[in-house]
Amino acid sequence: MDPVPVRPPQDAMTVRRLRLGIGVVGIALPIVLTAGNALLTGRVTLLDSISGFYHTGMRDVFVGGMCAIGVFLICYRYRRLDDALSTVAGVLAVAVALFPTATDAPAGTLTADDVIIGRVHQIAAAALFVLLAVFCLFRFPASEPSGAARGRRVRNGIYYACGGLILSAITLAVASNALPEATRDTLKPLFWCEAVAVLAFGAAWLVKGEELFRAARPAPPAGPPARAARPVPG
């Protein structure tokens, strides 16, 4: 009869599920928002940013997805520094959801409150992406368990690549403000930069979740001790 599989400890399983939840929601969010908006409007439309979905029929999905990421991050518990960083990141994710980006209203039609809320959204989003890059570049590689050196190198390479993509996306998003408005309206650089950053963030958390599950697996039981060889009679 097959032995009953041993599950990872509850704490390790909880951390793994949180990591996987963060990764799945992060990867799915830009895809679901774009596809859902296309179904609602009958055509595929790229907005100026992912946050712009707040002002569409996909508002509830955007707010729910960002709040889910925020709650997962706040509930995430690992090492002390990871706890603090993830809690701050979770609060920022909720702020991104609840303080919407400003609309493309004509100049002079936005109220002072709209401008302030839009600034809060921008600051929270920028700080959130920076913290997500910190996890990829520093926290995830530092918490890699001992094991096969090749596996660690591959996973660390993924973390560094994802962190580099996030920082590159932030840099390009800021630089895109120098483009002419007509070019930005056509290419939607901010949307693509945000999508790349969110997908990279989700991929890194998925990999980290699977790594923890492998590390928590018990070592296979040792076989019976070998019998000592009988002396050959002389």
Image (cartoon, helix red, strand yellow):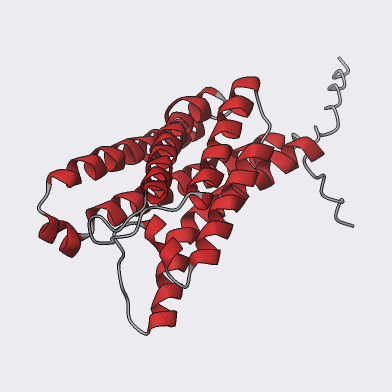
Task: Compare residues 148 and 42 and report the one nearer the observer.
Answer: 42
Residue sitting at x 37%, y 42%: 119
Quadrant of residue 72 within the rendered picture: top right
Q: Position of residue 170 (x, y in %)?
A: 30, 40
Q: Is residue 48 left or right of residue 116?
A: left
Please say whether residue 4 is visible from this viewpoint: yes
Quadrant of image for the N terminus: bottom right
Quadrant of residue 10 within the rendered picture: top right
Residue sitting at x 18%, y 62%: 185
Q: Is residue 151 above or below residue 112?
A: above
Q: Is residue 76 above or below residue 5?
A: above
Q: Residue furthest top?
A: 234
Residue sitting at x 65%, y 23%: 79
Quadrant of image for the C terminus: top right
Quadrant of residue 164 within the rendered picture: top left
Residue sitting at x 48%, y 59%: 29
Count of numbered tags: 0
Q: Position of residue 107 (x, y in %)?
A: 22, 56
Task: Compare residues 160 and 69 and report the one nearer the observer.
Answer: 69
Q: Position of residue 196 (x, y in %)?
A: 34, 50
Q: Is residue 40 above or below residue 143?
A: below
Please say whether residue 9 is visible from this viewpoint: no
Task: Compare residues 204 and 106 and report the one nearer the observer.
Answer: 106
Q: Position of residue 166 (x, y in %)?
A: 35, 40
